[in-house]
Amino acid sequence: MTIAAKLGGGDPDLNPRLRLALLKCRSANLPSDNIERAIKKGTGGGEASSYEDLTYEAFAPHGVALLIELSTDNRNRTAAEIRSLLTRHGGSIATAGAVSRLFQRKGQIIVTRDAAAEDALLAVALEAGAEDLRVEPEGFEVADGPGAIRGGCTGRSRRPGSSARARR
């Protein structure tokens, strides 16, 4: 929650990442004091700590490629923990670029069938810069490049639990 508040602000109505974190915390019965303290810490109030985003490239057992993205306040401790975890389970840290070349960053938006007609959704998705629209039995899957739709979409924002959801 601290990171979500730091990245998008402390208002859950304007920060979907924080809104999702709040829903998860409330479903896990996290005390309100802890929630408020984490939001204050992320927006600059309370204890100040510096988090940095790190990316590790690794190979799991059987050559499975892993791209591990995380945020930490202690780079050295995190590196030791990741290395230990991988070694203990038969994996290894890869050299820079060995794994990242195998991945592409994509966005994914899932829309239920009853939320939109296929033709209308296709027109909106193409106008917003989507790369692909796949028809699935449950609904539609819109794929885009990093930030493509976010920058070009002028539609309404949706609340958690509505008929469309986005994953990045």
Image (cartoon, grey):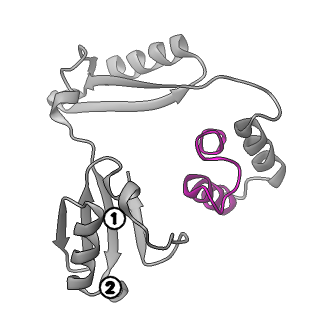
Assess disc 1: are there few (<14), some (14-19) or many (≥20) residues with their C-alpha within 10 Å of its C-alpha. Answer: some
Q: Position of residue 76 (x, y in %)?
A: 52, 10
Amino acid of disc 2: Ala
Q: Position of residue 33 (x, y in %)?
A: 84, 49
Quadrant hosting residue 130: bottom left
Residue 52, placed above or below residue 1: above
The secondary element bearing badge 1 is classed as strand
Q: Which mark is residue 161?
A: none
Q: Is residue 45 left or right of residue 163?
A: right
Q: Position of residue 70 (x, y in %)?
A: 46, 31
Q: Main secondary structure of the magenta part?
A: helix
The secondary element bearing badge 2 is classed as loop
Quadrant hosting residue 14: bottom right
Q: Is residue 100 left or right of residue 9?
A: left
Look at mark 2 in the image and give the residue it sits on. 116
Quadrant hosting residue 13: bottom right
Q: Position of residue 75 (x, y in %)?
A: 52, 15
Q: Nearer the viewer, residue 91 or 103?
A: 103
Q: Determine if the magenta segment contains residue 19.
A: yes
Q: Residue at x 80, y 27 (%)?
A: 47
Q: Residue at x 36, y 31 (%)?
A: 68
The residue stretch that appears in magenta: 1-27
Look at mark 1 in the image and give the residue it sits on. 109
Q: Determine if the magenta segment contains residue 4.
A: yes
Q: Nearer the viewer, residue 154 or 75?
A: 154
Q: Is residue 91 left or right of residue 98?
A: right
